[in-house]
């Protein structure tokens, strides 16, 4: 045993196990397979446990050129969705000895342009939502190992991408409404220049165009309840036949649509059906509860972190979009009889 007054070193472990310090480094760095035997590896681990040895991670990281810190860039902390993304990413990071720093993209008055003196010096990599891509240049995050969330896999700065299957979610919404008999549909679209919202608009238009007799109109709104209320109010009071269903790009827009409909004396779903996308807690606080697409935010964050770890290790990240699920509640019904 090493003297109790001193901290045991890798040399102490090597002497106790009867191996070289190089073998200790291989075993405790989990790089021993094919280089030392299982018996030797277990002897090293046992010696380390008996001595109470803990690696000096700071010194090890300095040698490896790693800080074991990852930046997660999100558009804002205004919804629980991105909190879920952070939770999932941090869970996987912790299992691998990494920390995650959260950086909301500045909106007007916001955080400093660069949360570090030098992002490249302080970070091992970046995970960023496409909705916050503009912040990457400001913090020089696009010059680091990068994983993009909710991003075009063919045009994301050459980075690895992790996506929810948003296109399938929109198809599920369209098929649900078409199956109920809706043919006049208003798309309450997020007024945000982002790939994920472009996918929603494109898939909705394509799905409805395949069914004769359908008519799709679009109203754009900022992602806020007040903004959605104003946009829905203007669209629903415009001349022409009123739509029988509203497809909202997220649940917050749907909440604004509810307010507009109530102000106009229209009932959900008797007069107009409404759908959302996210399945936030807000979806079940609305009355009637909102039909929406459930997105697994925590799994999204987990997959983002797993992809970044693969990039750092020189491996190809797992392919395939994360499945999503339509949750049918009380906000959708067949259209009213003309």
Image (cartoon, helix red, strand yellow):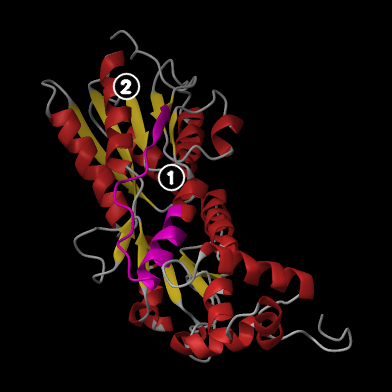
Measuring from the top left, give residue 186's x and y in whole percent: 29, 33
Residue where numbered disc 1 is placed: 228
Tell me, yes or no, if residue 115 can be seen here.
yes
How far from the left and from the top, in percent, is residue 160?
A: 30, 64
The residue under the point 20% across, 43% down is: 202
Check disc 2: other Cα within 10 Å, few if <14, some if 14-19, many if 20+. some
Q: Which residues are magenta?
A: 303-326
> On the image, numbered disc 2 is attached to which residue?
176
Q: Is residue 145 left or right of residue 99?
A: left
Q: CA distance from mark 1 to mark 2?
A: 23 Å
Q: Is residue 227 above or below residue 123?
A: above
| Rendered-image quadrant of the N terminus | bottom right
Q: Nearer the viewer, residue 334 or 52?
A: 52
Of residue 203 and residue 288, the one placed in the foreground of this image is 203
Q: Secondary structure at mark 1?
A: helix
- Helix, strand or loop under label 2: helix
Q: Residue furthest right?
A: 5
Which quadrant holds residue 307?
Answer: bottom left
User: In the displayed structure, would residue 96 be above or below residue 109?
Assistant: above
Earlier sequence position, callout 1 versus callout 2: 2
- What is the x, y in percent for residue 249? 37, 42
């Amino acid at each position: 045993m090493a003297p109790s007054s001193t901290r045991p070193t890798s040399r102490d472990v090597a002497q106790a196990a009867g191996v070289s310090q190089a073998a200790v480094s291989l075993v405790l760095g989990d790089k021993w397979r094919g280089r030392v035997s299982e018996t030797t590896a277990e002897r090293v681990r046992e010696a380390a446990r008996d001595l109470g040895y803990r690696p000096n991670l700071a010194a090890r990281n300095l040698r490896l050129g790693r800080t074991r810190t990852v930046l997660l860039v999100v558009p804002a902390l205004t919804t629980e969705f991105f909190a879920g993304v952070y939770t999932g990413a941090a869970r996987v990071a912790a299992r691998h000895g990494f920390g995650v720093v959260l950086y909301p993209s500045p909106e007007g008055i916001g955080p400093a342009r660069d949360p570090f003196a030098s992002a490249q010096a302080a970070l091992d990599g970046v995970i960023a939502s496409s909705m916050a891509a503009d912040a990457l240049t400001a913090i020089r995050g696009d010059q680091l190992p990068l994983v993009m969330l909710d991003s075009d896999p063919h045009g994301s700065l050459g980075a690895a991408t992790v996506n929810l299957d948003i296109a399938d979610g929109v198809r599920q919404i369209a098929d649900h409404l078409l199956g109920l008999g809706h043919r006049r549909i208003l798309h309450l679209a997020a007024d945000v220049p982002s790939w994920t919202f472009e996918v929603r608009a494109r898939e909705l238009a394509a799905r409805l165009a395949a069914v004769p007799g359908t008519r799709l109109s679009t109203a754009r709104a900022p992602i806020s309840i007040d903004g959605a209320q104003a946009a829905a109010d203007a669209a629903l009071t415009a001349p022409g036949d009123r739509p029988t269903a509203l497809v909202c790009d997220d649940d917050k827009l749907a909440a604004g649509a509810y307010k507009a409909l109530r102000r106009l004396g229209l009932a959900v779903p008797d007069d107009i059906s409404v759908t959302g996308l996210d399945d936030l807690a807000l979806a079940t606080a609305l009355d009637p509860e909102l039909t929406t697409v459930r997105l697994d935010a925590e799994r999204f964050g987990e997959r983002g972190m797993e992809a970044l770890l693969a990039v750092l290790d020189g491996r190809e990240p797992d392919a395939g979009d994360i499945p999503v699920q339509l949750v049918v509640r009380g906000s959708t019904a067949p259209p009213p009889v003309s």
